[in-house]
Image (spheres, helix red, strand yellow):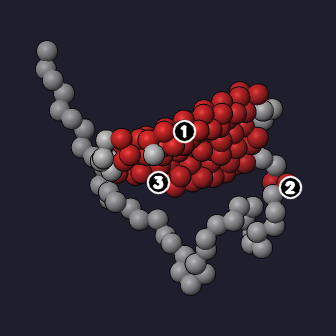
């Protein structure tokens, strides 16, 4: 049983290393930002996730303790990587994109935004009086 567990853990580590290597290579060699964005968010996420799952299995099988830290890190990584990639892609499109290349939003805006037609938000003034100047020091 222990030998099978060692083989499974080793295979997970090797697969994770290959995913990490492919993701890192893609980050360095792909031609533009939008292409490079997929390498770390897909392949490297699987690589780090494989290492964390292998670590979880090791502690569960050989140390008789269930390590929740690795599971939480894996879940956090799998949840945040796509959101981060989305933010980077939107920032790149906003900065370098051509408005003619974007899909039609069915509104007057070039970006798809949430609009509540029932109520338009007005800016709120938080300070109505100017801030007093600090007193001058006499020398």
User: What residue is pinned by disc 3?
Assistant: 75
**Which of 74/116 is in front?**
74
Residue situated furthest right in the rendering:
100
- Position of residue 95 in the picture relative to residue 17 (left or right): right
Tell me if mark 1 has few (under 14), some (14-19) or many (20+) residues whose alpha carbon lies within 10 angstroms of its own: few
- Position of residue 101 in the picture relative to residue 9 (left or right): right
Residue 101 placed where, x, y %?
85, 54
Image position of 91 with respect to 7: above or below: below
User: What residue is pinned by disc 2?
Assistant: 100
Tell me if mark 3 has few (under 14), some (14-19) or many (20+) residues whose alpha carbon lies within 10 angstroms of its own: few
Sequence order check, earlier mark of 1 and 2: 1
Name the residue: 70% across, 33% down: 22
User: What residue is pinned by disc 1?
Assistant: 7
Q: Is residue 69 visible?
A: no
Residue 116 placed where, x, y %?
58, 78
**Which of 127/85 is in front?**
85
Sequence order check, earlier mark of 1 and 3: 1
Q: Could you say whether the residue bearing mark 1 is in a helix, strand or loop?
A: helix
Mark 1 vs mark 3: give the one in front.
Answer: 1
């Amino acid at each position: 049983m222990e030998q099978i567990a060692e083989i499974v853990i080793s295979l997970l580590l090797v697969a994770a290393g290959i995913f990490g290597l492919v993701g890192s290579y893609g980050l360095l060699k792909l031609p533009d930002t939008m292409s490079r964005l997929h390498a770390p968010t897909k392949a490297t996420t699987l690589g780090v996730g494989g290492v964390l799952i292998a670590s979880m299995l090791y502690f569960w099988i050989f140390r008789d303790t269930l390590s929740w830290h690795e599971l939480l890190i894996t879940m956090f990584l799998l949840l945040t990587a796509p959101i981060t990639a989305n933010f980077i892609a939107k920032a790149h499109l906003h900065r370098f994109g051509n408005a003619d290349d974007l899909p039609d939003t069915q509104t007057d805006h070039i970006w798809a935004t949430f609009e509540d037609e029932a109520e338009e938000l007005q800016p709120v003034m938080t300070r109505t009086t100017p801030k007093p100047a600090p007193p001058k020091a006499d020398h």
